[in-house]
Amino acid sequence: MPATDRAIELCLVAARAAAQKKAEEIIAIDVSERLVLTDAFLIVSAANDRQVRAVVDAIDEAMLQAGARRQMREGLTEAHWVLVDYQDLVVHVQQAQDREFYDLERLWKDCPRIALPPMDGEDEVAGQDSPVTAVEM
């Protein structure tokens, strides 16, 4: 069963919030066929610990406004890799070197990606000069 409409909606909310804080390489993965705990992952890169914290705070605020309450958050103290669980969606905000090292995209390569539109009113196609990577399901 593919990710729920709610999970996809939350991916969009979180991706927009991350993009507003200049996060990069934003991708969404439908993990609903592999995990029972969540429907989707959003994976986001940030340049440093300050930006990781800013991205996490922006996502938290946007998700609360969308009616999604955080269930759990880990890693904010070091701010290298912060995992935030919103039940239908789990957000991973990683510094670039941690993202490269752990390579979550490779671990979940068999799962379909959720298409994300360009963020912040950008006209170009996502994935081309855009912080958001859109891949057809």
Image (cartoon, rainbow, N blue to C red):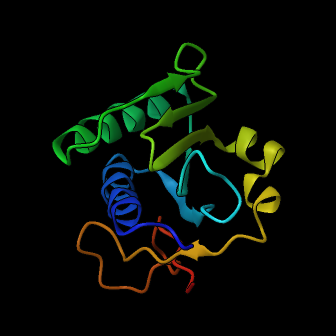
Instruction: Tell me: residue 96, above or below residue 135.
Output: above
Instruction: Tell me: residue 42, above or below residue 84.
Output: below
The percent coordinates of residue 15 (x first, y second) are 39, 57
Q: Nearer the viewer, residue 111 or 83?
A: 111
Which quadrant is the N terminus positioned in? bottom right
Q: Residue furthest left?
A: 65
Q: Residue furthest top?
A: 77
Image quadrant where residue 55 sits: top left
The percent coordinates of residue 88 (x first, y second) are 44, 50
Which quadrant is the C terminus positioned in? bottom right
Q: Nearer the viewer, residue 70 or 130?
A: 70
Q: Is residue 95 left or right of residue 107?
A: left
Name which residue lies at 30% across and 84% down.
123
Instruction: Tell me: residue 23, above or below residue 97.
Output: below
Name which residue lies at 30% across and 34% down.
69
Image quadrant where residue 94 sits: top right
The percent coordinates of residue 68 (x first, y second) are 28, 42
Name which residue lies at 48% across and 75% down.
129
Task: Please tell me how many numbered marks the rendered image carries.
Answer: 0
Q: Is residue 122 left or right of residue 100?
A: left
Q: Is residue 115 left or right of residue 30?
A: left
Image quadrant where residue 67 sits: top left
Instruction: Tell me: residue 134, above or below residue 132.
Output: below
Q: Is residue 120 left or right of residue 128?
A: left
Q: Nearer the viewer, residue 91 or 51?
A: 91
Q: Nearer the viewer, residue 114 or 122?
A: 114
Name which residue lies at 32% across and 68% down.
119
